[in-house]
Image (cartoon, helix red, strand yellow):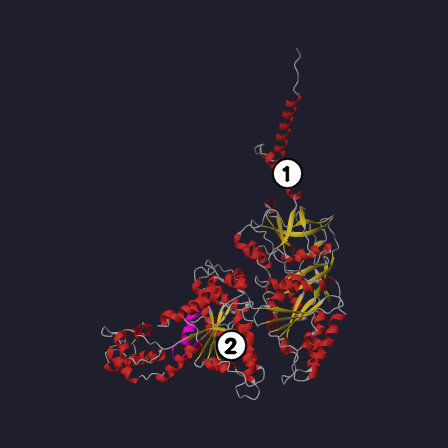
Amino acid sequence: MENKIDFSELLKKREVKLLCYISKILFPGLPSCLYPLYMFIQFCKICQQKREYILRTINPNLLSELIEKSKNILIDENYTVIINNKFLRGRDTIVLKVKYADEFILVNVKPLVSDIVDDGNILVSTTLMFNISNSFGLIHRDYSLSASFIEIPPGKLGFADEIHLALISNPYDLQNNVVDILIKNYLQTPKLMHENDLIEIALKKYAVDVPCNMTKIFNTQQKVYFKCLKVLCKHESKFNIGGNYAVFEETTVRQVANIQSFLPSCKEYRNSLTNNQYNKNNLRFCPSGLENYAAEIEAAVRPFLMKKLKVNPAFLIVGKKGSGKEIIISSIASKFGMHFYKVTNFDITAHVYAQNEMKLRNIFFNANLYAPCILYITNFENFEKNNDGQTDERIISNFTNGLKNLFESNKFPVILFCSSNNDKISPRLKREFLEIFRINPPSPEERTDILKWLLQYHDLHYKNSLEELVQKTNTFMFEDLNLLIRLAKSYNIFSKEKNDISREKLLLAIDYMQLHYNENIGAPKVPTVQWDDIGGLKDVKDEIIKTINFPLKHPEFSTSTGLRRLGILLFGPPGTGKTLLAKAVATECNLCFLSVKGPELLNMYIGQSEENIREVFQRARAASPCIIFFDELDSLAPNRGVSGDSGGVMDRVVSQLLAEMDGINEKATVFIIGATNRPDLIDPALLRPGRFDKLLYVGPATDSISRLSVLKALTRKFNLSEEVNLEDIVELCPNNISGADFYGLCAESWMHAVRRTIHQGSLDIKNITGKEIIVNMDDFKYALSTVTPSVTSEDLLYFEKLKNEISSNI
């Protein structure tokens, strides 16, 4: 039987011998097993080269932070990519093959390897993404790009002999010497240059030796852009794929005339990071809570970017000061890659009309020069007025003619936004705007989103719920909330954990703002009057709680039927606690309290009193849920046709008050409490159901139990001696004593105890405190001898009769 030769076994032996022979050549003196490991590494590199990644943009602040941590001075932010690929570690330059549909381009970039990036993504700067999308013609379009990299031998990139740079026209008004300094500082280290690409130079980083008279225009967020028109190199290398190095004193830099161009757009950065400490990369560019307004304005602006339309892109944005109008428009400008050219109305107005016309013409000329740009004019409510505060038709005509020249002959789009803090603009001027946008005070949900965004923006961590802060920041605008977070952050400077903000620090900042800025921001405060501060009036308390507290806890019942109780009128003799009762209701129900004195709304000018009433109700809607308390209502809303004023002012005031009360709860929860001593003088139209539909009599305490509760409430913070019996004091009081009289009794007894203590000399006057003052029975007896009841017996009979006629049964 013949022996069969196993050729497969023989082939395996020869392959093993061949591998061992090659291993000895490549790795002399080392074990032969290293060759398979070497081949495996090479195979992995080939697989990594063929792999495709998704291109995504990175937050510029995070990119700068990563470059600083790498401590590589040769890294250029414009052409740096962040990738999670260990095989690229230590590489100087790679070539990205970027694909879109069936097209592709090759770009020289510098890799920065980091573990924070998802394995399937490549993070690039906004400038590099703009240059790539511009090569494909994808500006202002939604797109998704993929890329793979081609490895090239190190050190094969050439140096450019000459480059041509053109400054992109911008509103910064940079002088030539400043531009030269920026270019010089930027090219101190070798930088990659590609033809027809934009180059971003940050003023904060490269303008360190600018003359002092120019530093006022610099902002840490401002950047200057250049366009590289030509890259000339005598000795081209076959590995130079559209790019070369440029360095100062080795490369000739020729600056040509300024040009106009779109800028890299700052869109939302998609989640592509694995490390939670870099969540700021996903921060919305437009603040959360304002994105609905931004989306609406963006939809109106977008058609004018693609092509020139026959209508003028002029818009009016109306909102209170600090509502976030500027940050909305600036975020839209950044998203579309347009310059943001801000001008205040005071830069346009002048004492002479001819100067006003010249200033407006210069501003419109500059807007065309900086195109594509958004021209933003603030304080526009004063634009049409002359030095005397009157509307000047010449200013309006000049503005109308200027708009025609602004939008006629511009190659790049110019969008005009005029910002007004109120709606006091003449209809003649409003007709020039294509659309009017209104920024309303933020709702509780929007304030929650804004606070979350601001905490993330300022790198702060808040562990508690934001519900309490939202309730205490009614009527706070965006800028007020931003100031609140910054103020709380300043309290946290000396803390060990600066990024952790506590509830106490935020509440302290809210109290500070309400104390110092209450009148400026128009924020109603929640008073600090508790039920314990009010004695007696148990029936009135229960009736008010049923009227107000139930709709707050169960809004679905009143919403489904549309029936709700609106107002409560408290009437009775003076000093019985009507105002104190309204404040206690606001405190216990955690509502904002807007106190309005009747006479303070009246004004000598025609129409101003009615406007004051409208502003009160507007502030209440913004602070919803809120209580409006009208004190001395009879002076604000007397019977119409009875008052003797010649102009009929009070009749118009009553009519305006009726109109506001009828439409107050359409979009907000607002309760109205009125207080008066003379309900018979109030216009009957206010006392019908649907307005002041609950009339409650607040009289002096007549029974001993109610009187005792009032006295206990007033003396609960006193240091009483053991001999004091409040029941005996109540028995000594007159029958017609009111709550205000009890207050005067307690105040006088306290002061008598203080004078007695000082006269005795038992305590040091400089170090004496309120707790050391002991009030005894003699002090109360002295006070009783000085107090006279403010309500007479005849007054009590009158109010009892009035109660039986008009009061609700309680």
Q: Is residue 487 above or below residue 381?
A: above
Given residues 504 and 153, the one toward you in this image is: 504
Q: Position of residue 390 (x, y in %)?
A: 64, 84
Residue type (three-letter) at the residue carrying disc 1: Phe
Look at the image and say whether residue 21 sits in the magenta stretch.
no
Residue marked by disc 1: 43
First in sequence: mark 2 vs mark 1:
1
In the image, what residue occupies the spot 74% across and 70% down? 407
Q: Who is closer to the viewer here, 306 or 29?
A: 306
Q: Dividing the image into 4 quarters, which one contains the N terminus?
A: top right
Mark 1, secondary structure of its residue: helix
Task: Name the residue carrying label 2.
Answer: 686
The answer to whether one can see residue 622 in this image is yes
Position in image of residue 534 (x %, y %): 37, 72
Q: Quadrant of the C terminus?
A: bottom left
Span of residues in magenta? 570-586
Q: Within the image, what quadrant is residue 725 found in?
A: bottom left
